Amino acid sequence: MVIEDYSSLLLAQDILEEQTEELSTLLKKAALVAVVLVVMVVLSVVAVRYSQASEPYIREVLALHGDSTRGEAIFRMNCAVCHGLEANGEVGPKLLGVSDRKTKVGLIKQVIGGKTPPMPQFQPEARDMADLLDYLEKI
Ligand code: HEC
């Protein structure tokens, strides 16, 4: 647009103002979308954590105080055949320091899940699982 007189200058100013307004509404919308996305991500992370910890069996195990001495005995009878008497690996991987790479919930799920054959699915009593967990966290 070529500015030839005062009235077209005013018109140009109007157009500019309108465009600035449109841009700022657009930016506000983008900011709103960004906030909504962040909230959704946070909520889904919380939901996953909550749903894992809210499984009744897992909650029951986590509420107990494990005894690693009993846990070691349980380990020797059920797990050592594959993971070794000292948990340093046979058919199954070495488990020393396993709690550095797996959470409590992850360890419980590994034992009761049966998702990684040939490791079988175990169904220990909550008390036994708590003891086993305490042992796995100490090695
Ligand atoms: C028949 C053999 C076998 C027996 C018995 C067994 N496991 Fe395993 N376990 C495995 C194998 C094989 C893997 C590796 C699975 C994979 O990741 O594909 C494994 C993986 C694991 C892992 C994950 C290790 C990691 O680094 O992520 C844990 C923890 C574990 N076993 C604990 C146990 C416990 C506790 C018991 C006893 C209650 C047990 N296992 C009994 C074979 C066995």
Image (tube, rainbow, N blue to C red):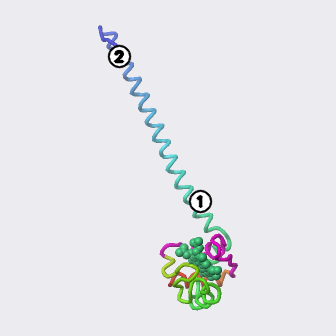
Above/below status of 105 relative to 133: above
Q: Position of residue 84 (x, y in %)?
A: 56, 86
Q: Secondary structure at mark 1?
A: helix
Q: Which amino acid type is marked by label 1?
A: Ala
Q: Is residue 62 visible?
A: no
Instruction: Please tell me which residue is depicted at 34% across the width and 9% down the height of the picture.
Output: 7
Mark 2–mark 1 distance (CA, rounded to whole Å): 52 Å
Instruction: Please tell me which residue is depicted at 48% across the width and 46% down the height of the picture.
Output: 35
Q: Position of residue 135 (x, y in %)?
A: 55, 85
Q: Position of residue 38 (x, y in %)?
A: 49, 50
Was residue 109 drawn as part of the magenta stretch in this picture?
A: yes
Q: Earlier in the sequence, mark 2 or mark 1?
A: 2
Which residue is at the front of the view, 135 or 6?
Answer: 135
Give the magenta range: 100-124
Instruction: Please tell me which residue is depicted at 38% across the width and 18% down the height of the picture.
Output: 14
Q: Which residue is mark 2?
A: 12
Would residue 38 appear left or right of 111 to someone viewing this image?
left
Q: Is residue 26 visible?
A: yes
Residue 19 quadrant: top left
Q: Which mark is residue 47?
A: 1
Task: Please tell me in which quarter of the rendered image ligand 1 is found.
Answer: bottom right
Q: Which amino acid type is marked by label 2?
A: Ala
